[in-house]
Structure formats: C-alpha cells, structure tokens
Amino acid sequence: MISDFEAWLIPNQQYEWMRKAMEEEGMGLAKYEINWDIGGFYIKSNEFIDLWIASPLFEAFPVDFVMGEQIEHSMGIIPVENNPVTDLPGIENYNLLGSGDYGIETPREGASILAVFRNDPDRNPAMISWEYGKATSLSVVPGLDKIDSAAMNQYQYYVDFWINQLYWAASFPIPEDVDIVNVIRRQMVHYATHRPLIISVIDFVEKFGASLSELNRDLGEVDGAKAEADRLYYVEQSYTESLDRLTEAIDMLNDISTKALVLKERALLWVYIIEWFTVTGTLFLTSYILYSLMIKRRLYREVHITRLREAEGS
C-alpha cells in the first residue's frame, strides 16, 4: 500500500523489487491519491508527478495521470455494479470518500472501473483496478485523509468497504455473505476493546492480594476460543463456525468481567472499612481532646485576676 508520498523517499531499486514481486510472486498493490499534489518541501511542485511517472512501479499502476487538470466537484462516489469491492447494502447513500481536490486518472487498457465520482459532471473514475503479472493493482483517487467521518459513524458496512479493498488488492476472496462477516468484524472490535479493560481490572485487584488463579485460567480458555475463531475466519473462511466460537469467547469474557468486578468490590470493601475506622478513630480522638481542653478544662489552672497597685505614697 502506498499513499500520497513523494517518490524520491524510496530508491528506484526498491520500486523495481515491488514491481517484480507483483509480476512473479503475486504481491498486490493499493495506491491512494499521489495523482495530485503541489509538491513537498524538497522538490518543485511540477516534479512530484514526474518522479512517480519515471519510477519503475508506475508501470504497474492501472491508470495514467492527466497532467494539469483536477476534479473540483467530487463529494462521494457511485459504485459500479457487479463488483465485490463495493457490493455493500446502502453504499450509494453515503459519501464514503469525502470531497477534495483530486487529480484525474484514466484507466489503462484492460483496467476496470469500480466507482466514479458522484458530483463530477464527467463521472471521472474514483477507483480503478487491473491485473498486473500475477497480482492485482488497485488505484483509489482520493487519499486516506478523505475518509468521511459521518459515514464512518453512520454506515454499518463502512469497515467492510475498506477491508474489501485490501482483500481485492491481495487477490483474496471477498466473502459473499456480507452480513455475517460484518457481525464477525464488529464482534472482533468489541473483543479487542473489551479485553484490555478486563485486564486492567484484574491488574487492579491483584494489587490487593486477591486470588486470581481462576480468572487467569478462564482468560486462557477465552484466548483459546478467540484464536480458534480467528483460524476459522482467516484460514478456513468458515464464517458461521467462526461466529459461534467468537460469540462463545465473548460470553466467557463477560463472565470473567463479572467475576473481576466482584473481586474488585471485595477488595474495595476492605479499603472502605479501613478508611471508616481511620476516620472514625480520628473523630473520637479529636473529640476527646476537644472535650478535655475546652469543656472539662482539667488541664488548665484557674488564673487569678491581677491589678496594678497604686504606687505607695501617691
């Protein structure tokens, strides 16, 4: 994956290695933007595109760059039908790639258009792909900095839109059952975010000397179930079985969370008890001192009133 950086940052020899890896080994390529830039700090603006065109890797791009022109009214994309990359429910209702200044790319002979710009009167391509050697080469005109935040929060299949691009570039089969794969991916995100929280609770409880042997054993079983779900998902592509194992792992994780919270409450109970005794003892001690000094006053002796005597003979 290469995304909107200057060609001189990598030696041409390495670009040549990439190209040969695509030809001979089937290594995929996903290119984002690069087609429109005013130049960086170290090169002239008109050299940015020229250096890319001169690089050995440019031959593997599925597009040619149109010099000196740009798309001004992009605002989202329209997927081309019958391609698995963008074949997602309701995708036409969201601006998956935000508006910006983009260069124009024309597909090379043999390339396929996967999506076009929505508000562009000329319907210029936004996503183009072809086969190069043994590999798939994908060009996405907008850069990764144009991810639409609204679609990311509102569109259920947004993560699938991006993962499908990686699958496509890697020549990996894109799952046909979009719904079950979407559920699995969401559950994996839930697992990845929930597990560290439980670990932090367990670490907190451990500081109070609680016995964690049962929790650690259960956590090992959960990790084993998650590893089996990953194997079924990534290696076997057995999505139903993977979801079953993942659901089992999450249920076990929830049980561990409940047990960890119980241990936390027990540990904190002793903290509260110690605090109560400390505060109560301090109250009794200060009350006794106050009573002794200010009320009973047994530590004081009465002081007689003194007056200045008049000088004798006055």
Image (cartoon, helix red, strand yellow):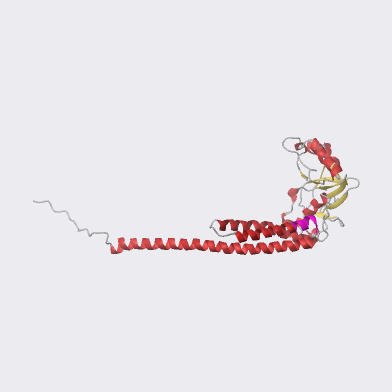
On screen, residue 242 above or below 71? below
* Residue 272 located left or right of residue 245: left
- Residue 310, image x and y in percent? 13, 53
* Residue 139 located left or right of residue 253: right
* Residue 222 located left or right of residue 261: right
Q: Quadrant location of residue 278?
A: bottom left
- Residue 168, image x and y in percent? 82, 51
Farthest residue toward the left? 313
Q: Nearer the viewer, residue 134 or 142?
A: 134
- Residue 31, image x and y in percent? 80, 45
Q: Nearer the viewer, residue 234 or 52?
A: 234
Residue 243 seen in this snapshot:
yes
- Residue 176, image x and y in percent? 83, 59
Q: How many marks?
A: 0
Q: Quadrant location of residue 292?
A: bottom left
Q: Residue at x 65, y 63 (%)?
A: 254
Q: Which residues are magenta?
A: 229-237
Q: Nearer the viewer, residue 146 or 137?
A: 137
Q: Residue at x 75, y 48 (%)?
A: 144
Residue 87: within the magenta?
Answer: no
Instruction: Name the main secondary structure of what is drawn in magenta.
Output: helix
